[in-house]
Image (spheres, helix red, strand yellow):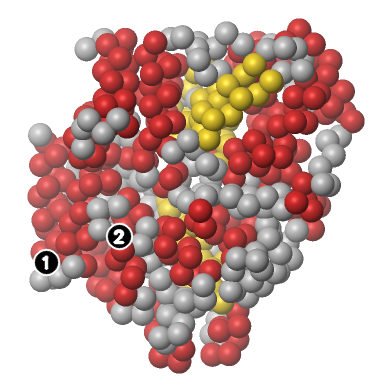
Amino acid sequence: MNNGDRKLYLASVVDRYVRGQIDRRAFLRTAGKLGLGAGMLGVSSLVPFGGRGGFISPAAAQTIQYSDDMTAWLKETAKPFAGQTVRLATESTPPSNAINSALKPYFEEATGIKVEIEVLPLEQVLQKLTLDVASGLGTYDLYYLDQSWMASFSGDVIDPREKYAAKPDLAMPNYNFDDFLPALVDGISMYDGIMVGVPYDIPIFIQMYRKDVYDELGLKVPATMGEFLANAQAIQKAKGPSIYGTTGQMKSGHYSLECDWTAWLWGHGGSVFGPDGKFAGNDDQGLAAIAYWQKLKENMPSGVTSWTWDGQGQSVGQGLAGQVLSWGEFFPSWDNPESSKVSGLMEAAVPPKADALRTVSETGYGEIPGVGHQGGSSLAVSKYSKSQDAAWLFAQWATAQETQVYITVLGGGTGPTRSSVYDDARVKANAKPGIAGTTRHLDAVRETIANHMGSEPDLPEWAEISNDTIPVELGRFWAGEYDSPKAVMDSIKDKVDGIIAG
């Protein structure tokens, strides 16, 4: 199958899935073989409290004032493109929501370029994207790219570094590619030497806990996996069942269950694959991770096996858990006094240190063990766009330091992808407890990205394995259908190795 035929077939598969003509398992298997990664319908569908970054602080929105230099540059540079329209289809993420609801008018007024942003469920974003690249019509000028889509669409976008160098008259002053966090450039924007897009969004696991509960019980922030478990047990003993020791996102068959599993697996020195390309989750380290997880679950609400990330986030916001290892994007929502029962009570820290940590060479398929499980996305310019230059101006503006600062202080819950944003005085000024859109968790986010970030394997079959095989079998285990951790892990190994061999 040549590349053009592959694109057409991929577009037809995605379209049939969105229209309900094929089931999830058939879609995952076929799309995975065509190059789409696991996260195609995974972590990027994170929707705590009704939508990632679903709240915008009205007070913060009123303070937006772009610098005179930025405004003047946009006005002058965009003159040849005034009246053009750039189009983007994106899921509901903090950057997209903040830009679409509050920041877009500033760009449109300065440039005369109209921006149309469609905010859609992730599978519909994928549908729009695949149909666009298959047809080559350029209906969309900008692509929202989940990290797991990079391989599939690397040939359909313009390398932003090359665009920046080739069009100096369109190069935003002080845009500074080196300001993007290096781990994110490598992890979510690069494929086979090509920079597919610029880093746009980064959900990542950090540690979050109730300071009032910790203070009352004399607990310290866990530095190890053992201390995290001991704290959960202490909270449960003293405060349960009104406050549980921790909580989870463990719905059977859902990718969120696989996300939790990988954090505990990596944290115990294990890995999904070994260097021989075989499933390794049933080795001694993998079994230790499941045994640890069993003890943790004894200190969780019973509802965790029916919750994805949304239920997990709400359980903390409703005051049901004393600590959690999960997505840092939850944190600003928990400080919102209008919707949270724990406003001002939560604190953030880096994940507990792994008991041991395998190197990339000790795993398979580019897997990077780390307790801070990550997901992320990039913003890319389509090579089929009829308004490439206008789209490139918008992409630079949308990911510029100043825009990222405003996205962050508006209260969207984002983890900035630029180093300078974390140090900006406006961002630090929002690091206060008890306000919607607090930024006081961001130091933990930045350190986790730099030193604790974990990334899943990269292989075509991973879509089916991580979205179906692993969470389905783990769900059966938590439902009591397996009699031991070894039984479920051996079963997963048989299935995973069979999928790869088959």
Residue 502 percent location from the top left of the image? 10, 34
Q: Residue at x 55, y 25 (%)?
A: 88
Residue 179 percent location from the top left of the image? 67, 37
Residue 348 percent location from the top left of the image? 59, 67
- The residue identified by callout 1 is 481
Q: Quadrant of residue 182?
A: top right
383 left or right of 436 in image = left
Identify which amino acid the numbered label 2 is placed on.
Lys
**In the rendered image of this protein, does residue 109 appear above or below residue 454?**
above
144 left or right of 288 in image = right
Identify which amino acid the numbered label 1 is placed on.
Glu
Per the image, label 1 sits on a secondary structure element best described as: loop
Residue 102 percent location from the top left of the image? 71, 40
- The residue identified by callout 2 is 251
261 left or right of 218 in image = left
Q: Residue at x 57, y 8 (%)?
A: 386
Which of pointers 2 and 1 lies earlier in the amino acid sequence? 2
Foreground residue, 82 or 466? 82
Q: Residue at x 48, y 22 (%)?
A: 194
For residue 119, say whether it is visible.
Answer: yes
Q: Quadrant of residue 16?
A: top left
* Numbered label tally: 2
**In the rendered image of this protein, does residue 37 appear above or below residue 209?**
above
Q: Residue at x 21, y 60 (%)?
A: 474
Crowding at dot 2, Cα within 10 Å, few <14 / some 14-19 / many 20+, comes out as: many
Foreground residue, 478 or 157? 478
Per the image, label 2 sits on a secondary structure element best described as: loop
Q: Are marks 2 and 1 in contact (CB under 8 Å)?
A: no
Foreground residue, 370 or 139? 139
